[in-house]
Amino acid sequence: MLAWTIYLSFAGALACLLTPRANPRATRAVALGTALAGLLCGLMGAVQFKPENGLEVITNVRWIPALGIDFSLAADGISVTLVLLTGIAALAGVLFSWNVEHRTNEFFAFFFALIGGVYGVFLSLDLFLLFVFYEIAIVPKYFLIAIWGSTRRDYAAMKLALYSFIGSGMVLIGMLAAYAVSGLASFDLQALAQHSFAPEFQRWAFPLVFVGFAILAGMWPFHTWAPTGHSAAPTAASMLLAGVVMKLGAYGCLRVAMTLFPEGLKMWQTELAALAVTGIVYGALVALVQKDFKFVIGYSSVSHMGFVLLGLATLNLVGWSGAVLQMFSHGIIAGLLFGVVGRMVYDRAHTRELDALEGMGLLKAMPFAAVTFVIAGFASMGMPGFSGFIAELQVLIGAWQAFPKLAIIAGVGIMVGVVYTLKTTAKVFFPDKTAEAELHHDHGRELDPISVQERLGAALLILCTLVIGLHPRLLLDLIVPSFQSPLFDGLRKVAGL
Amino acid sequence: MSWILTNLWLIPVLPLLAAGISALLKRPNRSLAAGLAIGSLGASFLLSLMAFAETLGKHGPAARQFHNFDWFALGDTVVRLGWVLDPLTAAMVVMITFVGSLIFIFSVGYMSHDENFTRFFCFLSLFAAAMLGLIIANNLLLLFMCWELVGLASYLLIGFWFHKPSAAAAAKKAFITTRIGDVFFFLGIVWLYSETGTLLFYDGGRGCLEQDALSKMVAHTTIGGLAASSAIGLLLFCGAIGKSGQVPLHVWLPDAMEGPTPVSALIHAATMVAAGVFLVARVYPLMEMQQAGVSEPIPLTAVTWIGALTAIFGALVAVSQTDIKRILAYSTVSQLGYMMMGLGIGGVAVGMFHLLTHAFFKALLFLGSGSIIHGCHEEQDIRRMGGIRKFMPVTFATYAIGMMALSGVPLVFCGFWSKDEILTAAWLYQPSKIPFFLGLGGAFLTAFYMTRQMCFVFAGKYRGGHDASHDDHGHSHSHGDAHAHAHDPHESTAVMTLPLQILAACTVLLTLVSTPLWPWLPEYLVGEAAHWRPDKLFNAGTLTLLLVSAVVVGAGIGLGWWFYGLLPAEKADEPDPLEQQFPEQFAWSRGKFFVDELYAATFVKWNTRLGELCHNLDRRVLDLLVSIVGWATTGCAVLAKLFDEFVVNKLFDAGCGEVRRGAEAASELQGGQIHQYLRSIGLALVLFVFILAVGCNK
C-alpha cells in the first residue's frame, strides 16, 4: 500500500502535465485528487503497519544485478511517520496553491515530481535507489523557485541547487566508498548497516555523509540557502521545502550516515551537537532582526531543525524519537506558517516587508489569517498542547543526558523563539494606533477574502499539530519500536542500549 | 476509590467545555456565553466542595490520594499523567471556583458595554480550566502544560483591548517575561526527569516527591557543590519568580493592569500570580531537602530572600503610584513576596494560608476598584477621584473592609492573622532577622499606601468629571454645569455590588478559622487536625508580636491619615504631600526604581545587537564565502571556455567544417524554447520512474 504513494504521485505529475494549460481547473482537480490519494495510501499503510515487526520489506526486485542494485522498498515506523507528513504537506500545499494561474499544469507536475521523489526517499531500502529519489526531489525544487518564485529567485534557486548538489556530491562519495570498502557488492542498507566498517574509515566517512545530508537539513553553518530559498519560493514550494525537503536531509542523516557509521557518530557526537545548538540559538537570533516576513520564518526553520540534529546526536532513544517527532512537527508547523505568510498575506498585500505590513491593518482586513498565525506562532514556540512541545521536550531530555550544558543553551534558544514570534505577530497584526490611523487616511485597501481552500488547508495543519500534541502516542508508538529493528543494531550497540 | 477522586478531572474540564462551546458562538449570544461560563464554573465549585469534603477528617499521609494513567512512550519508558487530591488541591480548587464564579458574575456587569463580550467569557473559561488543571495535576509535565496555558490565557486577556497599543505591548511583555522564568522551569523539569525517571509527584513510592527519588537526588552532587535536588529546586523556583511577579521579573505584573479589571482581579491578583507560590508549595518536599554541610535548604533560602526583597520593593513603589489599579498591582507584588517568604521560613501552612486569605481580599479590592472605575467613567487616576464615599456607599464599605484586611488591621480581618503568622515565623527564623524587619517595614508601608489610596479616592470632594484641567475642550460654563450631574460618579448595579458584599463577608468570616486560638485553616492545609489552642495565643512571644504588628499598622494608617486625610487634596494637579517632603526618594519610587529602563538599556539592547551580529555574519561572511566559491568556479569555467575556443576548437573546426554544416541543418528541428525542454525532461523522467515502478512491482 505504502509504495503506491510513490507511483501515484508520479502518475499525478504526468496527469497534471497532460491537462491543457488553458484549463487550470482541471489541473487543480487532478492535483487535489493525487494529493488526497497519496495521503489516503499513506494513512491506510499506517493503519495496516505493525510497528513491532520493525522494518517491513514492501518490494524487492533486482534492478542492476551487476552492481548489486535493487529496486527495494521497505518501511518502518520512521518512514511511515514521514510518509504521513509528506501526504499532509502535499495536500495542504495543493490547497494553498489554488491561486496559481501561471502555467498551472507544469507547476503541479513539478510539485508532484518532487513529492514522488520525497516519498521514494522515505521508503527506499536500497542506498542507490534512495540516492536516485533524493536527486529526483532536488531537481523540481530548482524549477519551482526559478519559474514561479519571487524576490531574487534566480539567485535563490541557484544557491539552493548548488548547496544541494555539493551535499549530494559528498553523499555520493561516501556512499561509493562504503560500497567499495564493505566488499559486499550490494547497496542494500540493511546489509551495509550490519557490516562493521573500520573505525578509521568511519572517522572520515561519517562526517562526509552526515554533513552532506545535513546541508539539506539546514545545519549551521551550511544553512544560508534555506532562508533565501524559502523566501524566493512560491508558497507551496516553501511549504514543501521547509515541510518535507529539509526532512529529507535529516532522514538521510539518520537512515544512512548514522546506521552505516555508528562509530563515526560516537566520535563526532559533541561537535555535531555543538553545531546543532549553535543553529538553534543563531537561527532564533537572526530571525529576531529580519525585516522580511518570510525570512523570519525561514530562520525559525533553521532554529527548529537544529533540534532535529541535536536529537540525532544525543545517541539515546529519547533523543532519537524526539528528533523524528520534531521532523513531523516542524513539517506541519512550518507549512502552516509559510501558508499564512506566503499565501494569505503576501499574495494579497504584495509585500513582505514588516514595516509596510505594519501600516495595513491586517487584523481587520484578514482576521482569519491573524488567528491562524497566532495559533501557528504558539505552536512554533513550543506551547504545550501542540506537537512541537512534546518533540522538543524529548530532544531536550535526551540532550540533557548526553550534554547538559548544550541543553541549557538550547533552552535559551527557545526563549528567543518566543520573543521573535511575538514581536513579529505584534508588528504585523497588532500594530500601534498611529499606523492604524494612517490606514484611515489611506481609505483602507480591499483585500480578497480568505478562500475556502486556505481555510481547509490551515484547519488541516492546525488539527494535525493539536492531535499529535495531545495524543503523541499516535506517532510515538510507530517511531519508538522502529529503533529495535536490525537496521539499528550497530547504533544501539554504540549507544549501549 | 471514591467517586470524586476518579472524576476529579471534571473540575477543569467543565470550564474547558464552556470555553470550547462559547468559542463557536456568534457575537450576539451574550447571555448564553455568560451563562455557560458561570454555570460550568458553578458546577465545578460544587464538585470542588465534594473534593473538599473528601479530604476532611483525614490526616497525615491518608489525606493524599492520587490517580494516574499512561500518556505516551518517552524512549523506553512511559510518561504517565494523573491528578492528586490532597488538602492543598482541595483548598485551592474551592477558592478558585468560588472567587472565580463571583468575578464571572461581576464581569457580566462590568463588560456589559463591550462588543466582544462573548469572546471575553470564552477566554475567562479557558483560563479557569487551565488554572484548575494546574492545581489538580499530579505530574510536573501536566502542571507545566497548564502553567503555559494560563500564561496564554493571561496573554489573551491582558491584550483583550488590543486596539490600545499599551495593552498589546503589556500582553507581549507579560508573556515574554514570564517565559524567561519558564525556560529555567522547563530545564528543571528535564533535569528532574533525567535524575528520577519520572515526573509524577506521587506514585506509591515511585514519584519524584517521594523518599526514594528525593534521597537519590540529594546524594548526587553536581556543579558548584550543589546537590541535584537543590539545583532543580532553584530552577523550578525561577518559574515561580516569573509567574508570581517576584523581583527581578516583576516588571510585567503592573503593566498587566491594561487588561479589563475583572481579569486583574482573577488572574493578576487572586489566582494565576499565586500559581508560582502554589508551585513552591507543591514541590515543597523537594525544596526542603537539606544537602550535607549546609545549615538551611538552599532553595528555601532563595525563596525567603527573594520573597522578602519583593515584599519591601513592591510596597516602596506602591507608595507613590497614582493609578488605582497600579497601586493594587504593586501591592500584589509585595503580598506575593510575603507568601514566598512565608513558604521559605514557615513552611506550606504559613505561605498558603496567606495565599488563600489574600485571594479573597485582593479580589475584593480589585473588583471594588473596577466598580469605582466604572462609576467614574473609566477614570483610573486617584487624583481625579475624591469624595466617592457619598456616591458609592456599598463600594466604599466593602472596599474599606478589603483595605483593612490588606493593611492588617488587628483582630477581625483574616489578613491580619495570616500576615502575623509570616511575621512570627520570620521572628523565629534562625539564620537572619533581616527578613523579619523587611516584612515589618513592608507591613508599615502597606498600611500607609492603602490609607493614602483611601483618602484620595473616598475622602474630600470629587475632583474628576467637570474639572478645569480635565475640560480641555473649553466648553462654555453653563454647558458644563448642565453636564455636571451626568458626570458624577454613580453606584454600580447589583450584579457588581453583590459579589463585593459576598467577598467582604468572606474576608471577615475567614477570621473564624484563622486565629491561633483555633488555627483550623493553616493546619488543614498540611493535613493536620486543628485543636483549640488558647495557650498558643496567650503566650508572651505571640502577644508581643501581635502588639508590635498592631502598633506598626496603626503607625502606617496614622501617618497616612496625617499626610493625606487631614487636608484632602483640593485639585487634581496638586503635588503629592509626600513629594514635597522627600522629593528625591519620591521620584525613585514613582519611577519604579527604573528597572524597566535598566532592562531596556541592557538585555533588550544586547539581544537585538547579538541578532544583528549573527545576521551580518550570515550576509557578509557566509554569503561572501559562497560567492567566492561561485566566482572561482565561474573563473575556472571561463578559462576552460577560452581553452576550448582557442585551442581545442581551432583544431577541431579545421577538420570538421563539413560536419558542422550538416549539424546546423539538423538543429533547426529544435525549437529552442526552454520550457519545452523542461517539459520533455520532466516527461521523460516521470515516465521512466513510472515504468520502472510498475514493472518492478509485479
Image (tube, coloured by chain):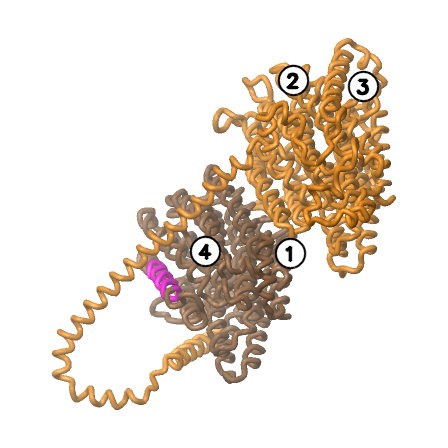
Task: Tell me which corner region of the image, top left, top right, bottom left or bottom right, holds residue B286.
Answer: top right
Q: Is mark 1 on a helix, strand or loop?
A: helix
User: Nearest the camera: B433 or A398?
Assistant: B433
Q: Residue B437 carries which label?
A: 2
* Chain ID, mark 2: B
Above or below for B396 versus A10? above
* Colour used to depict chain A in the structure image: brown
- Whether the magenta-drawn stretch holds residue B392 is answered as no
Chain assigned orange: B
Res B487 → quadrant? top right
Left-right relation of A311 to B163: left
Does residue A165 belong to the magenta stretch? yes
Badge nearest the viewer, 2 or 1? 2
Residue at 33% in and 51% down: B621
Determine contact: label 3, label 4, CB under 8 Å.
no
The residue beneath circle 4 is A250
Say which label, 3 or 2, has the lower sequence index: 2
**Which label sits on residue A467?**
1
Magenta stretch bounds: A156-171
- Same-chain check, marks 1 and 3: no
